[in-house]
Image (cartoon, rainbow, N blue to C red):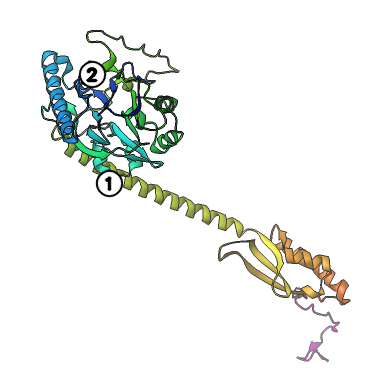
Amino acid sequence: MVFEGSSSAISHTGKIRSNNQDSGYSGANLFAVADGMGGHAGGDVASSIAIHQLEQLDQAYDSTDDAQASLQAAVTTAAGDLIRAAKERPELAGLGTTVSAIIMVDDHAVVGHIGDSRIYLYRDDELTQITTDHTFVQRLVDSGRITPEEARYHPRRSVLMRVLSDMDNDPELDMFVMPALPGDRWLLCSDGLTGVVDDAHILKAMRLGLAPGRTADNLLKQALDGGAPDNVTIVIVEVGGQHPLSSGTPTIVGAASTPSGVLIPPARAPRTSWLHPVRQAANDPSHFEPAADYLEELIEEDRRRAKRRRIGWIAALVIVILALTGAGFLAYNWTQTRYFVGADEDSVVIFQGVQQSIGPISLSSEVEDTGILLANLPPYQRASVERTINARSLSDAQAIVDRLRVGEEAVTGETATPTPTPPPTLAPTPVPTSTPAGAALTTDGEVIG
């Protein structure tokens, strides 16, 4: 049965890379995306080989089992083609590609997947990623060691743990069957899209309800606006829906659209200057498949990185705590150089510190209760005291209290008795007396003779 609906495929080199290693296919029953790896030498060749093998599957199938068997056979044949290509052309050694494909069989979708290109399903206003990335960071996410958000920026996010390559003639493909309902939208894309545009923005684009071609253009524009450091390939399939199939002609995009034997010159490299240095790493392979013992090395490195990260966070936390403690100590010492005149329940008091508090901690303490009753002050002075009066020093505060005493005298009519100051103690001055010559004094001061 021929699939009824509409679809669109688009591929773009991106803003950084100089050639397109992605390939995509949109036909009557088959829809696929392949993201090549191997740099200039082999990425485009690998994705082209995979798509050209898969396009032979674009036909009606009697059952989903037949479609699954054909899909597995085509991928295995593509792996053999990659191996032969690497033997015939040694410079292609290490080439490989991801493959994400859907074959529509009646009201079911047969899904095949290997690598980190993705397939999403938009249904009932929800977007669901139905494939699992075969990457090192996805293993870390699955084991709970990092979050999906951390995986987006992990330095090893390009490490593929499973891929269609010239090193395995029997690739392990994830395969399953899902129901395809009218109104469903399937999105197949390379990581050039998902590495820049997150799921929330993809969902927003899907919700607009535009035709598949316009939706693909919208997503591509978002990727380009985000810098598009990698090739971007998008295939959108709408089951039934309001956008009828405009053409049954298969569409091939990306590297696979180049006729065999035709060389496409790479895009001109950006001009360099000291203001605009060239980004050398941009055209390095976006993916690579590790050797057998590479995973253990990565896990150990990840452990070391996590340990360094914990130590860094602890050190930073200690520094922050010490800095806050030191700043708090200096700030408190400064507050204790200040004074103000305020009130307790009924009298005027001199305080040391500042009026503010930090939670339950008061930044002032009582120095002297002056004995001046608030009730005995003129209204304006009483209001000033209740609002508190700042003083530059203790002597300044005492001068303010003296002025308040004057106000108290004016209200009560009484003269405040100043605190007596004892006079300095002086030695008694002896009183001189006249004593006749030859006379003597008794102990009582009487003259004898």
User: Which residue has dot 2 on it?
Assistant: 48
In depth, the one of 69 and 35 nearer the eye is: 69
The amino acid type of the residue labelled 2 equals Ser
The x, y position of residue 159, in whole percent, is 24, 32
- Label 1 to label 2, Cα distance in Å? 36 Å
Whether residue 153 is visible here, answered yes or no, is no
**Residue at the image position 34 percent from the left and 26 percent from the top:** 234
* Residue ID for mark 1: 145
Q: Given contact means CB atoms under 8 Å apart, are the residues at marks 1 and 2 in contact?
A: no
Badge 1: residue crowd in 10 Å (few <14, some 14–19, many ≥20): some
Judge left or right: residue 200 versus residue 130.
Answer: right
Viewer-side residue, 435 vs 275:
275
Left or right of residue 246: residue 172:
left
Which quadrant of the structure image shows residue 345? bottom right
Per the image, is 80 magenta? no
Look at the image and give the residue range highlighted in magenta.
Answer: 426-449
Q: Residue at x 82, y 76 (%)?
A: 417
Specify whether residue 436 is painted magenta.
yes
Tell me which label, 1 or 2, sits earlier in the chain. Answer: 2
